[in-house]
Amino acid sequence: MHDPDDEVWARILTTVIDESHLVAAEQLTETVDRALRPAGLGVEVLMVDLAQRALHVVLVDASGAPIPVEGTTGGRAYQLTEIVVGGDHDGERVLWLPLLDGTERVGVLRVALDDEVVDGAILRRRLWALAGLVGHLLMTKLGQSTWLQQLRARRLSPASELLWQQLAPRTLATDRVVISALLEPADEVAGDAYDYAVGDAIDLAIFDGVGHDLMAGISTAVAVTAIRNARRDGIRDLTVQAERADALLEQYDRPGRFVTAALGRLDVATGELTYLLAGHPPPLVLRGGHMVKQLTRPPRLPLGITAPAAAPADVVGHEQLEPGDRVLFYTDGITEARDEHGRFFGEQRLIDMAERAEQDQLSAPETLRRLVAAVMAHQNERLQDDATLLVLDWASDRHPRLFPSISDHG
């Protein structure tokens, strides 16, 4: 004996999938809403902006202002990656579901329930499956839709446009690792970037190009390209990867330009982290919610500087991580952010906030979003330098935090 509701939901998913091949990005909300009407549900698809400050309805003629991520029911669903209950009017029943593309948060799904619809675990499991499909569709449409790109970021500087096109997703996870990264200011970032690649080993890097203009972005783009190209050529030695970046920057960049970087390679099976600092701040290791050490192997010169200099013979460091360890990489735009009185945000404040976030069991992407929000607030919402964070969790139980718990209560 079969459940007739199963047939309804099979038709819903089939309709969304079939129509998605030809539907334009600005029609996505209408398409999903039309498919769900037979189940007594009304839907709005909302995309988060690049700075993760507001949620925008994916609809050309959407009425009403964007929904702030801070202090709203929809924003709470986004922040906590949970299904949250809350209507806009008395008596209205609404479920807010996080939208993910893989494990990257891209927005929320607002689902209004008709009176006869029962809110329970079965409905929420079905809606969560639908939300996964919609999250993938949203990001698939993003690359070819100028309208959707404008909705996501009203204005990007040329340097920001260059770098955002190169970056990996902000969050990626397996059952062994979680990687998350964040750049600010999202619309004007010039020389910062991050990169990672996932396999039996995790390769990752964070970059900070000198300057605050398009040329800084070009220098960083060249460095990222060189490191990626070296990895894909099978080069695992971080020293040789850095030398490949030196050579490419020397060949194609202007004299005096350079890029600081922290390169890392994690053996997923053993937890051995190999790292190299090229004039970059040392990463932090957090264990059990507390910072236990800095990775302070003496650095080599920044990428692109090849003049002879007194430098340690071996610049590659090795750190044995323990299960559950978190490694936090950052650029100096975080710690050197100044308030109106010239006071630095500082390393200790970064450590304190990172420890508190782990003790509060926040997900990696939400930890970074709140850290960057604090840095922005410290500088009165106007950074003087790019600020970038990248976090790596190894062999932990943190990956379930990236997904909602399915229950009858929101």
Image (spheres, grey):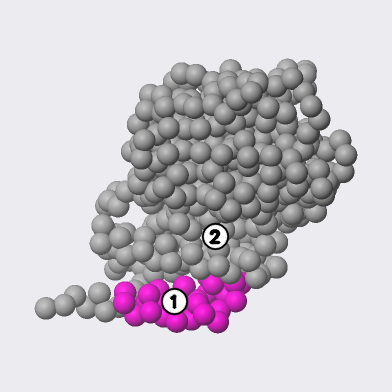
Of labels 1 and 2, earlier in sequence is: 1
Where residue 288 appears, as percent x and y from the top left, is: 38, 24
**Residue at coordinates 53% horizontally, 55% vertically from top-left?**
106
273 over 103 or under it: above or below: above
Where on the picture, by quarter, is residue 345?
Answer: top right
User: What kind of element bears circle 2?
Assistant: strand
302 over 201 or under it: above or below: above
79, 149: nearer the viewer = 149
What is the total number of numbered labels drawn onto the structure image?
A: 2
Q: Circle 2 sits on which residue?
A: 46
State whether the magenta stretch is mostly helix, strand or loop: helix
- The kind of residue on which mark 2 rests is Leu
Callout 2: few (<14), some (14-19), or many (20+) C-alpha neighbours within 10 Å? many
User: What kind of element bears circle 1?
Assistant: helix
Residue 356: tell me if it is visible.
no
- The kind of residue on which mark 1 rests is Val
Q: Which residues are magenta?
A: 9-37
Where residue 234 appears, as percent x and y from the top left, is: 54, 50
Residue 28 colored in magenta in the image: yes
Q: Circle 1 sits on which residue?
A: 16
Residue 45 colored in magenta in the image: no
Taking the image as shown, residue 167 lies to the left or right of residue 217, namely left
Residue 292's label in the rendered image is: none
